[in-house]
Amino acid sequence: MNIALIGLGSMGYNLAKNMVSKNYQVNAFEKNMLIVENIKNDNIQNLYLLNSIQDLVDKTPSPRIIMLSLPADKIDKCINDLIDHLNPTDIIADLGNSLYLKSMEREKLLSRFNISFLGIGVSGGPRGAKNGPAIMAGGCEHAWANVKHIFEDIAAKYDDQKACCFFGSPGSGHFIKLVHNGIEYALMEGLAEISNILMQAYNMNNDEKANAFKTILQTNSSSFLLRITSEIINAKNNNNQYFVDEVDNLIEQNGTGIWTINAALELGVSIPSIYEAVSTRYLSKNFYSNSKEINEEKNQYDEGFDHREIPLEQIIFFNFACSIYQGLNLINESNNWDFFNYKMEDVFKAWSAGCILQGNYLDLISKKFKSSKILNFEFFFNLIKENCSNKLQSIRKFNSKAIELGIPCPVLSSNLAYYDLIFSKHEIGETIQLQRSFFGLHPLKDKNNTNKINPYWTKL
Ligand code: 6PG
């Protein structure tokens, strides 16, 4: 298989570097001449820059794989430009953050021209792309068989196993990448909320927070995201000013979190923490904090509290476990669609290294799944029980403190509410069913779901 690559932005260029370091020859085309000039200066061996799509295709004989590393809104045009130049044995692989539904459409379109399509989610950012990303593929099976070795060669490794998986149907790889990103939003927001509570409720400064996070980097709660958070929290610019004090608080997003929510709504799966994380991104920058009255309303931090007593390790584990369980459950439920058929162990394998979600907490969940083989509420309950002591008292206390002081913690609250909704006795459904029946005269059943109940208000 000869390799052609379109798009040498930060992801494409680093994937190219990764491939040439594994002795592949890569022919590439990049439209942006500024990028091309910079790359020429790097003089990378076995990376050949071509001048047009026509030139790229001419110099890369069939059988060939054309990899696209482009923004999601550029993929369709590029595929249209390519179609007339390709042969039936050729493969187009979209390596961007595309919506799984688009990958399904693209596969259909290309199959009319006998061109194979692969939709491949790549995680790990430009650094991962260069040194070993996590790879989540879906699409034409025989095409994958022909190029699998390339992706396995460049993927990250975990215990001699490659963080690279083929999940089957077109769209299946991009769906796993989409859920990965939704979870990523919730974990990032969770850590940011914890950091904010440590500062506002427990009066910890940036160095103390960074150290507190660093002390748990060797534990089961550790992760890539925790490590980078512990590093950025007290990082400073050349003027000795913290970057967290300098940076704008508008949170940007590329849309993958929104796609995750849409998929969950369509499947009827509850992923409240992921929703809260996306919602906070929308709300960011719209905070109204200038009024003296608002600031006076908030209680002051508790100076007497010893922050060494905060069970950070458990707080982080609990919140990560709740958010990731929601995402894994979404994947599980997506098997109800006849076009997906995921095996959870493959998801764990793809996320074992290279990706943003990687970490000890995930290794532990994956190991637990290996023995239980089933992802259900019992699995979730035992996971929390084995890793968070004392009936979550300290986790509740941490959240309560924030709420008491008016410190926003939408994802932390949502994780706890999700857990409590599932495992506590509550009388919410009963009340809502009666409300519905009162004004809508909707039929009611008893708790055994056998006999009908007809309260007096159901008679007009
Ligand atoms: C990854 C990341 C990657 C990227 C996204 C983040 O897995 O490597 O998820 O795909 O960083 O662009 O998304 P936002 O821009 O929406 O935060």
Image (tube, grey):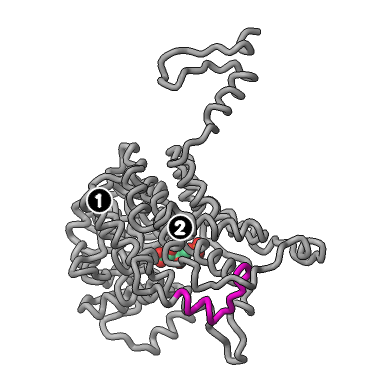
Q: Which residues are magenta?
A: 200-213
Mark yes or no: residue 52 visible. no
Q: Position of residue 44 (x, y in %)?
A: 31, 85
Q: Amino acid at mark 1?
A: Cys
Q: Give the x, y percent position of residue 160.
A: 18, 69
Task: Examine the structure image and report whether residue 251 is included in the region drawn in magenta.
Answer: no
Look at the magenta stretch and give its main secondary structure.
Answer: helix
Q: Which mark is residue 140?
A: 1
Q: How packed is label 1: few (under 14 Cα within 10 Å), some, or many (20 or more)? A: many
Task: Decide if residue 160 is on the left or right side of residue 289.
Answer: left
Q: Is residue 230 above or below residue 327?
A: below
Q: Earlier in the sequence, mark 1 or mark 2?
A: 1
Q: Position of residue 316 (x, y in %)?
A: 44, 63
Q: Position of residue 248 (x, y in %)?
A: 64, 72
Q: Secondary structure at mark 1?
A: loop
Residue 161 placement, left or right of 326 = left
Mark number displayed over residue 269: none
Q: Quadrant of residue 363?
A: bottom left
| Residue indicated by mark 2 | 319
Query: Of the residues shown, which amino acid type is indicated by label 2?
Result: Asn
Residue 46 against residue 443 in the figure, above or below: below
Q: Is residue 404 left or right of residue 170?
A: right
Ligand 1 located in image quadrant? bottom left
Q: Look at the image and tell me whether residue 264 can be seen.
A: yes
Reply yes or no: does residue 203 show up in magenta: yes
Position of residue 103 relative to residue 231, above or below, is above
Q: Quadrant of the C terminus?
A: top right
In the rendered view, would you say 182 is above or below 421? below
Q: Are marks 1 and 2 in contact (CB under 8 Å)?
A: no
